Image: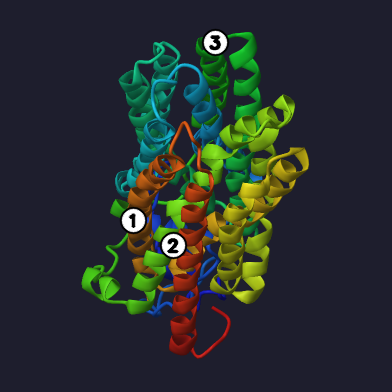
Amino acid sequence: MSGQLSRPESEQFSRPASADPGRGHSLSLMLEKGLNGIGEVSESNPESPPSPAHTFPEGGWRGWLTVIGGSMIVFCSFGAVQSYGAFEDFYARHTLSDRTPSEISWIGSVQVFWLFAMGLLSGKLFDEGYFHHCIGFGSALYLFSVFMLSLAKPHQFYQHLLSQGFGMGIGMGLMFLPALSVPSHYFRARRSVAMGVVLAGSSLGAVIYPIMLNNLFKSAGFAWAVRATGFLDVALLLFANIVMRTRLPSRKQRPAAPPIEIKKILTDRAYMVFLIGASITLWGFYIPFFYLQLFSALHGVNKKMVTYSLSVMNAASIFGRTLPNVLADMWGPLNVVVPFTFIAGGLVWAMYGATDIAGVIVFGIFYGFFSGGFISLVNPVSATFAADVNEIGTRSGLLAFSFSFFALTGSPIGGALLNPPHYTWWQPLLFGSTTMIFGATCLFIARIMMVRRKGSNRV
């Protein structure tokens, strides 16, 4: 978010008179609009008329309903991912107690993998104008899988993996990226506010889900606890599917964009250093989200605090996913994400001392805030490496695809290092902290390379 684009938005995307306003537009358009500019864009069509001021309505009732609907989808998808620690704890101590924490964590890791990996498909479908198809089919698959999870039998690992890992994960992946994309159809000047509302939905979901699950596991049992979240999801996703609308034409309805030079992107050294660093950071990123509740329970923390440990952390991440974006607007996203990632990496190791109520609260607040800063800024940072707006979607797609493999393996590695029943907690925490700090170091190197490339410290 390093400045305003040098080219009016109507010059980049000319809408034909016959365009259907109910179709989506390209992933690269979404990202360009959602990030408020990422550098210089070439004047490929200088004779195009200037965009009228009313091209972007800056909300309106339709725009804000779309934003609210997007936040509800992110609430159900990414919010559920960040709440997996409640399942990890319950499975490890009850219904899958015959499995190791490492094996159990594969369920959540597969879910995260599909959330990111499906971005390649859902981004392409959104690009071609199939927004409602994506969120409709994704919602149906996700809800079906939630209720199938409620039927999973104790100690039947494959039933949990298929429903929660694969079914819910693929459904999330189909919904997630389009839900983040479509609000940019309505906003330009207030785009950061709109995107912040959407992204805050994930943290709000990650506050509510653990509270519901941990209380209902005890009072109603596993099946009805999962069904209760499913009924909540039905209401939220139904509302989102009804109110969300696209406004701009799809890729098929506007002039063909210049071809993407994949080789050029893959040989961009600064971008590849960033890609490696951000991906390795994700290796340790989810360890506290998966294991904090189990850690607290096994260290004799007050049972009520155990119940709310994940919710405290995710409540703090609401601010971590919004305030850093304001700083990034002023100072540049790379300048903000580097210290946030370093601090988050150090905090993973600090979890080792969170063995009482005060420790869990303090750790949860700080890790939620600084880890939220990393996850909210990583896409804006990716966009700053693009020489042309048409590259942004490809670069972000490569980032998401790379993320999926590290998210898949990070938490199971941490679970294997945990070495139950001895529970040597220092090993997974050291792994998580080391990988995140190494990743932050790569981000710092990428920042140095970008400063030299741009001749400016604002990157």
Amino acid, disc 3: Trp
Screen quadrant of the C terminus: bottom right
The location of residue 117, given as percent across then percent down, is: 33, 46
Marks counted in the figure total 3
Label 3 to label 2: alpha-carbon separation: 38 Å
Please tell me the numbered disc located at residue 302. Answer: none
Label 1 to label 3: alpha-carbon separation: 36 Å
Amino acid, disc 2: Ala
Q: What kind of element bears circle 3?
A: helix
Q: How is the image coloured?
A: rainbow
The location of residue 398, given as percent across then percent down, is: 32, 59
> Who is closer to the viewer here, 152 or 377?
152
- Badge 2 density bin: few <14, some 14–19, many ≥20, Cα 10 Å: many
Marks 1 and 2 in Cβ contact (< 8 Å): yes
Q: Which residue is mark 2?
A: 278
Marks 1 and 3 in Cβ contact (< 8 Å): no
Query: Residue at point 57% right, 85% down?
Result: 457
> Who is closer to the viewer here, 363 or 417?
417
Q: Is residue 106 above or below residue 448?
A: above
Left or right of 26 on screen, residue 424: right
Camera sees residue 250 = no
Q: Which residue is mark 1?
A: 402
Left or right of 196 on screen, residue 145: left
Mark sitting earlier along the chain (1/2) = 2
Amino acid, disc 1: Ser
Q: Is residue 5 above or below residue 186?
A: below
Q: Which residue is mark 3?
A: 224
Mark sitting earlier along the chain (3/2) = 3
